Amino acid sequence: MGAMRRNLIAGLLIAGGLALMATSVPALGLLRAGPQAVAIQPIPGLGDPLSPPHQHAKFLPGTGSTGAGPSQVVAYLSIPKLGIKNAQVFDRGVDGGGNMLIAKGYAITHYANSSPIGSGNAVLYGHDDIEGSIFARLQELAVGDELDVTTSGGEAVVYHVTTRTIVAPTAVEILRPTNDVRLTVFTCWPTWVDSKRVVVTAVPATA
């Protein structure tokens, strides 16, 4: 009986110690709830989610681009901070059901129904956790960071990040035309959860 009692007391002491640690660790700053919060811009959902199978609004006013062929590289994108160098950019449209066709592998999709790169709002998408995970660290970009675009014709343009937001997957407003020249670059987030979208906007350095 003495041994059983000692074991019982030891068990209670261990359980109490664990409970005390659980309450004190967050206070010590050793436990973090996840990635640092990013400014969230609430956008009402319009019913065409920017999520697999990557649907978007069927009609974008002011655009009529049919895009280049599926095997033709339209540009190269480099993001020094993320270690991305000369990633190929392909135009992709939608299938008969309105689903966006996504470039495979370590490649970036230019939405063919958005403005051409260098003219208006050019929308780019890359995977965050599959097929190369090219934009797995997109959320690390901050205002002022550099994006370098080289067109298939060899013209190089430096862009600087102006905003980074997290939006719902229904935020199709990011696809719409603008009066200025910009890149709207986005991916799914958080990794392996993909319930939100990280959206980075960048404008030419001369703008």
Image (spheres, grey):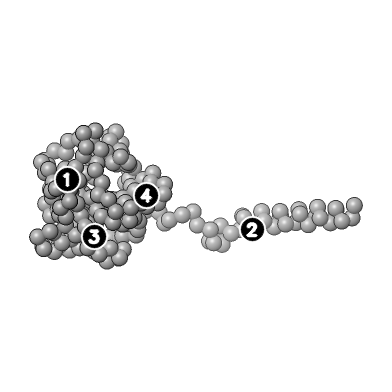
Give how far apart the Cα atoms at labels 3 and 2 are.
47 Å
| Circle nearer the N terminus (4, 2) | 2
Q: Is residue 80 left or right of residue 190?
A: left
Give how far apart the Cα atoms at labels 1 and 2 are.
54 Å
Q: Mark 4 or mark 1: which is in front?
A: 1
Q: Mark 4 or mark 2: which is in front?
A: 4
| Circle nearer the N terminus (1, 2) | 2
Q: Mark 3 or mark 4: which is in front?
A: 3
Q: Which residue is mark 4?
A: 189
Q: Which residue is mark 3?
A: 87
Amino acid at pointer 3 = Ala
Q: Which residue is mark 1?
A: 112
Label 3, secondary structure: give it: strand
Residue located at (25% from left, 46% from top): 102
Amino acid at pointer 4 = Trp
Amino acid at pointer 1 = Ala
Label 1, secondary structure: give it: loop
Give how far apart the Cα atoms at labels 4 and 1 are.
23 Å
